[in-house]
Image: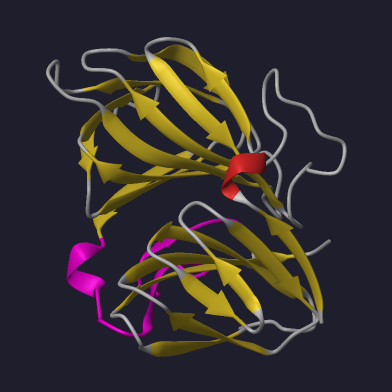
Amino acid sequence: MNTVLHKADTRGFANHGWLRSHHSFSFANYYNADRMGFGTLRVLNDDRVAGGRGFGRHPHDNMEIISIPLSGDLEHKDSMGNTTVIKEGDIQVMSAGTGIFHSEYNKNADKEVKFLQIWVFPNQRNVTPRYDQIPISDLKTDNQFYQVLSPTPDDQGVWIHQNAWFHIGDLEAGRNATYSLKAPSQNGVYAFVLEGDVSIGEQTLNPRDGYGLWDIENLEVKAQSKARVLLMEVPMH
């Protein structure tokens, strides 16, 4: 088993006034040669956007982009003709492929929106751009990990062009949940604690800590308090 630990207070941070963003991996003006991603997981940004503000129209290509709102409402517009609002309990995915433009704004003027912005390198370049958004609140099962993303269009959750699986665990204090890797010989898992305190093996993790593990087949997450954990299984090469 190999591991890498990224405590919350070691992340990069950018404060643009309207945007406060913590970067688990190198992004924009934050550069750390030892933190260029975890396998094909390239970006994990923990963003807070002030009321009525947001990201203007900008381009992406050849990247799988996943947004998971944690609170508030985020309005999305793109060059594919989509105009939607994503909120807590949703997950959004874009395959940028040959290229897209999009914008993201806080729908509400009176409160901030919090969301995770995640980028995963695709296993196919120059695909036709696509967009999807679904509620994941109805997939929730307490005290076990439920799937919200996979490589397969007809599987549970959204899908991306990569041999990757995302699961969320909502755990009561004192409960354990086990995750078995789908592709243990090629993949690792990056655990990101959204709420509460947990342990994986001998490692204690607190809110917004990240912990990557590879060369494993299973991992057990033990909740020290009521907790929510995002597991991202991705190819390591």
Is residue 24 something that shows in the picture? Answer: no
Q: Is residue 30 above or below residue 8?
A: above
Q: Give the magenta range.
A: 136-162
Colour pattern: secondary structure
Determine which quarter of the picture holds residue 89: bottom left
Task: Identify the residue at the far right of this view.
Answer: 33
Q: Quadrant of the C terminus?
A: bottom right
Q: Is residue 152 above or below residue 113?
A: below
x, y percent for residue 166: 49, 66
As for residue 150 lying within the magenta part, the answer is: yes
Q: Quadrant of residue 131?
A: top left
User: Can residue 215 be seen in the rendering of this structure?
Assistant: yes
Q: Residue at x 35, y 48 (%)?
A: 132
State the image coordinates of residue 23 (x, y, percent, origin top left). 60, 35
Task: Give the number of marks.
Answer: 0
Closer to the camera, 174 or 77? 174
Residue 82 as seen in the image, left or right of residue 23: left
Residue 162 is situated, as x and y percent measured from the top left of the image, at: 63, 60
The image shows residue 24, relative to residue 227, as above or below, that is above
Residue 219 vs residue 225, the one in the foreground:
225
| 75 lies left or right of 1 | left
Residue depicted at x 17% and y 24%: 111
**On-image quarter of the N terminus:** bottom right
Q: Position of residue 35 (x, y in %)?
A: 78, 43
> In the picture provided, is 19 more to the left or to the right than 7?
left
- Residue 35 belongs to the span the image colors magenta: no
The residue shown at (25%, 81%) is 141
